[in-house]
Amino acid sequence: MPAPQAAQAAHTHLVLIPSYNTGNKLFETIADARTHWPSVWVVIDGSTDGTGDALAQRCADESATRIIRRGLNGGKGAAVLDGIRAAARAGFTHVLVMDADGQHPAAMIPEFMRLSQQNPQAMILGIPIFDHSAPRIRIIGRRISNMLGRAETLSAIADFLFGFRVYPLAALLAVMESSRGMRGFDFDTEAVVRLSWRGVPAINQPAPVRYFSIAEGGVSHFHYGRDNIALALMHLRLAGGYFRRLPGLLSRRLSRR
């Protein structure tokens, strides 16, 4: 995206980074994001590792980097919800959500924002391109969740779990405030399913992802047992809404042919 367009879009399009105990990777991620986009906000979700205080000191003179602090850890979705509520009040219309652990490609931010500007009604969804660092068990679990998500939406959405995305802010805020779900690890998948049900179109865009080892400063709060059970319960919860919406989903799919 040319610099003038990026400067203009920075008033409507925001990078939002939720963070919980991600250590120094948080500072690296913010610096990388700021290299590619002017407006970057961070939600400190009850972190106990001192990153909230350290970030406040580092960003004291940076008006484009806003820090929102939650007293207690509520989960990724809860942090995103606090962030988009504040972003809506500030006049932003779109938000690119990315993880704080360095896995997501900050260099792709301008391209995702450009696609969003060209397609303001759509959500721009990253398709993860994995390298050798990706744990095989995570890839297998992702395939299962993606299969369920495509069945629930009757859509051509490529990936329901990858958290590097641009959302139309008003639509995302509406679906989150209308549900008690989407507050934890279930946020990424359920948000896309419910937005798809509302007729928000999706644009799939490939993006590389990297998993860092502990020696490289990698941090992961994913628990295979707990979080996979949470995803399974989420899909069961969505099943009721799916069957109510099935006639409309079928009609929409047929109209696209």
Image (cartoon, rainbow, N blue to C red):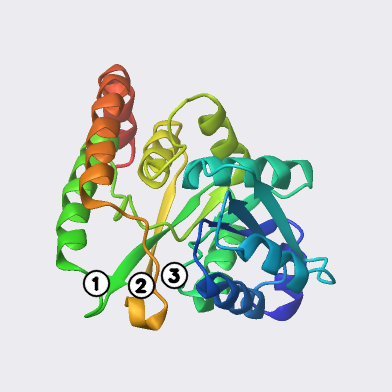
Q: Please determine whether, in this image, residue 251 is positioned above or below residue 141.
A: above
| Distance (Cα) linking label 3 and label 2 | 5 Å
- Which amino acid type is marked by label 1? Ala
Pointer 1 residue = 134
Residue at the image position 69 percent from the left and 67 percent from the top: 55
- Which amino acid type is marked by label 3? His
* SS for dot 2: strand
Query: Is the C terminus in the top left, top right, bottom left or bottom right quadrant?
Result: top left
Using a 10 Å C-alpha cutoff, classify the residue at mark 2 as few (fewer than 14 neighbours), some (14 to 19) or many (20 or more).
many
Using a 10 Å C-alpha cutoff, classify the residue at mark 3 as few (fewer than 14 neighbours), some (14 to 19) or many (20 or more).
many
Q: Quadrant of residue 118?
A: bottom right
Sooner in the amino-acid sequence: mark 1 or mark 2: 1
* SS for dot 1: loop
Pointer 3 residue = 104
Q: Nearer the viewer, residue 137 or 11?
A: 137
Sooner in the amino-acid sequence: mark 3 or mark 2: 3
Q: Please determine whether, in this image, residue 233 is positioned above or below residue 126.
A: above
Residues at discs 1 and 2 in contact (Cβ within 8 Å): yes
Q: In the rendered image, is residue 154 in sight?
A: no
| Distance (Cα) linking label 1 and label 2 | 8 Å
Residue at the image position 52 percent from the left and 66 percent from the top: 112
Using a 10 Å C-alpha cutoff, classify the residue at mark 1 as few (fewer than 14 neighbours), some (14 to 19) or many (20 or more).
some
Residues at discs 3 and 2 in contact (Cβ within 8 Å): yes
Residue at the image position 44 percent from the left and 70 percent from the top: 104
- Residue 209 image label: 2
Residues at discs 3 and 1 in contact (Cβ within 8 Å): no
Sooner in the amino-acid sequence: mark 3 or mark 1: 3
Left or right of 136 in this view: 238: right
